[in-house]
Image (tube, rainbow, N blue to C red):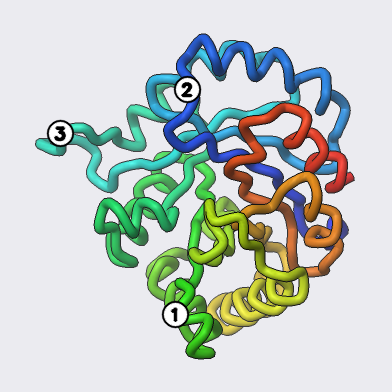
Amino acid sequence: MNPAKRRTVIAGNWKMNFTPAQAREFIANVTPLVAGKDNCDIIFCAPYVTIAAAMEAAEGTNIKIGAENVHFAPKGAYTGEVSAEMLRAIGVEYVIVGHSERRQYFAETDETVNLRTKAALAAGMKVILCLGEVKEQRLAGITDEVVGMQTKLDLAGISAEELKNVIIAYEPVWAIGTGLTATPEQAEETCAVIRNVLADLYGAEVAETVTIQYGGSMNDANAAELLAKPNVDGGLIGGASLVPEKFAAIVNAAQ
């Protein structure tokens, strides 16, 4: 982390977990564990049907509630989708875009990720933009090329001013939900690659202000070592974000 230059962000991605009642209970349990931990932003991204309950439970706390995805069209015949305007209407501030599970299971591409990012930014939301390589690409030694290309394509047409509202989450796909974790050295190396690409696109000064999280089985046991790296500015947390004590331990590591 480099808190002198950029904000540390610890965000939980609940994925397809928690009913509204379960979300309220979780927020009630985690709130006292993270109260006063102001050295980082704390966010939980919730399923659409749970957002309102989570926001109500988090009111008056240091916890923000976000969404897990957003469509790129303002409205129309897109059954099952939710627009940026709809999310903003209920007060959503943050949204995850381009998560590997969306790319893998729902055929999202860099083109649609770029469109979703633009739509969310235009609506005044902050985007947690996910990118990362699969196992075969890591083994082939082309991680840098893959994440560099994703960074360029996903941010195509996005200005330096808009980039102020983008958080990048480096998520090696091979480490998501597998129990595997990139070593702190691997995480640092690839986050630095992403920052170098940002410097090429926007200039070094702008690149130094962008928060780059690590995602991919970050948990209470490995968070401190990962967050100690200068280019790892937080985490996008999956499984550990479902357990108050584990998530709070990660927040503590960010202090």
Say which of marks 1 and 2 sits in front. 1
Above or below — where is 129 with respect to 83? below
The residue pinned by badge 1 equals 136
25 to the left or right of 83: right
In primary-sequence order, the first of circles 1 and 2 is 2
Q: Amino acid at mark 3?
A: Thr
Element type at marker 2?
helix
The residue pinned by badge 2 equals 51
46 to the left or right of 181: left
- Tell me the quarter of the picture where residue 189 sits: bottom right
Q: Amino acid at mark 2?
A: Ile
Q: Which mark is residue 79?
A: 3
Above or below — where is 231 with respect to 128? below
Label 1 to label 2, Cα distance in Å?
36 Å
Count residues near mark 2 (Cα–Cα under 10 Å), then give few for <14, some for 14-19, many for 20+. many
Residue furthest bottom as drawn: 141
| Foreground of the two, 164 or 150 | 150
Label 3 to label 2, Cα distance in Å?
19 Å
Residue 86, horizontal then vertical, whole percent: 33, 27
